[in-house]
Image (tube, coloured by chain):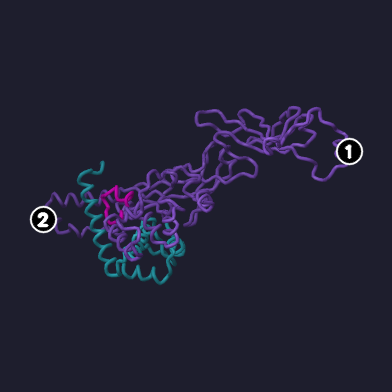
Chain colours: A cyan, B purple
Amino acid sequence: MMITRSDFLLRMHLDDVTLDLWMVEEWLLPQRAEDDLLFTEADLARAQLILDLQADLGVNREGIGIILNLLDQVHGLRQALAGKLRPPEA
Amino acid sequence: MQVDVIFRLSCPRRRLHDQWVESVEVRDPYEILGIGKTAPAEEIQKAYRKLAKKLHPDLNPGDRQAEADFKELSQAYGILSDPEKRRRFDQGEIDASGEEKPRQQYYRDYAPADATYGNSSGFADFAGSDSFLAELLRRQREHARRMPGADLHYTLVIDLLDAINGATRRLSLPSGGSIDVTIPAGVRDGQVIRLRGKGAPSQGEGPPGDAMIELTISPHRFFVLDGDDIRLELPVTLKEAVLGGKVKVPTPAGTVMMTIPKGSNTGTILRLRGKGAPRKSGGHGDELVVLKVMLPSSPDAGLEELVSQWSPEKEDDLRGDMLS
C-alpha cells in the first residue's frame, strides 16, 4: 500500500519545503516512481516520530539525525537478537 | 453548572465506540507531570520534555508499558499546555480524561518489517570475527525477508440497513485503488473487519499484512437501533388511532402490514417480532413501532364540527399532577 507525495503531505500536515529537507537529510527515504514519490505506512510513522522529536521534545536538526541513526541501529540489533532467540521456521 | 453539562454531553470520549470509554481511573495531570498547581507554562513544558524523553515509545522500542505511560503523559500535557483547557480543568469544568491526540501506531511497530532504514552497523564489526555472529546476521536478513507487511487501518461509513442486512461496499483507498468489503449482516458500530492479505505488501518476500476496517454506522432517517431492537416512530391518523385498522409499516427487511388496535394513543408501542437486527446468539431482535397520532395537516371543517359536538364519556385530568 503506497502513499503518494501529495497524500503524504496531507496526512502529515507537512509542507513541500520541510519534506524536501527531511529527504536531503535522509531521515526519510521514499521509493521513487516515474513522476512521484511513494511512501509507506512505516514512513508515516517515522515522520510522526520526527515531528514528535522536533515539536514536543525540542530536538534540533543535528540531534534528530543522530537519534534516527541510533534508533535504526537499535532496531537492527533487536532484529538480530530476535532472530537468534526465535529462529525463523524453515 | 450548565456549562459543565453541555461539555459532558459533547465530549467525544463518552460517545459511540467502546474503546473510547476505557478511561477508568485517570490520574491528576499535575501529579503525572510532577509539578505544582501554580507552575508556569515553561515549567510544564520542561517537565513534559523530561518525561517524554523517558517514555516516548519510539525511544523505548522494547518497553511495552511505555505506550500506556506516554499516552497518559500526552493527555496530561494536552490539558495543561493549553491555558484555556488548564483553566477549565482547574475550575472543575472538564476532567482529566479530556484531551488525547489520536495516535494509531509508532515507528517501532513498523521498524522490524522495514528494510528501508535497517542498519546493521551497530554490530557489523562482529561479523568477520565469529561464525556464530555471522550466522546470526544471516538469520536476521532472512527473517527481515520473510516479515509480513504491516496491517493497514481504515474506517468505512455504512448505512444502518447495510449493517442489519449485510452488503458489499467498495472502500476507496487514500493511495488510489479500492477494496470490496463484504459486510456480514448484524455488524455493530465500531466493529472491525479484518481482510487478510489486503494490508501493506511485505518489504521482503513475506505475505502482505491485513486491512483492518472499522465500521461506523450512519444514522437512518427513521429507524433507530436500540440493542438488537429497531425503534420506529410511526405517524398515524386520528381515524386510525381511534378506530384501529391495518397500516403498512417499513421494516429493515421490507414493508409489512400491521394492525393498529382501536383506541391507540401517541406513545403506544407495538412490537413486530423478529423484525429487528440479527442477534449475536442467533435470531433477530424486534421492531418497536412507537405510534404518533397526527391531526390533519390543515384545519378540517368536518373534524371541527365533530369535536365541537362531542362530549367525552369521561373527562381525563391530563395536567392535574403538574398543577398541584
Residue B149 locus on image (x, y percent): 36, 50
For the C terminus of chain A, the quadrant is: top left
State the residue lying farthest toward the front.
B324
Residue B294 locus on image (x, y percent): 76, 40
Are dots 1 and 2 in contact, CB under 8 Å? no
Q: Chain of mark 2?
A: B
Q: Is residue A66 visible?
A: yes
Q: Which residue is mark 2?
A: B129
Q: Identify which residue, B230 or A87, lies in the foreground.
A: B230
* Location of residue A1 (image quadrant): bottom left
Q: Which residue is mark 1?
A: B305
Residue B267 locus on image (x, y percent): 68, 35
Residue B225 locus on image (x, y percent): 58, 38
Is residue B47 on the magenta stretch?
A: no
Q: Residue at x 28, y 51 (%)?
A: B144
Q: How many residues crowd mark 2 within 10 Å: few (<14), some (14–19), many (20+)?
A: few
A54 left or right, relative to B167: left
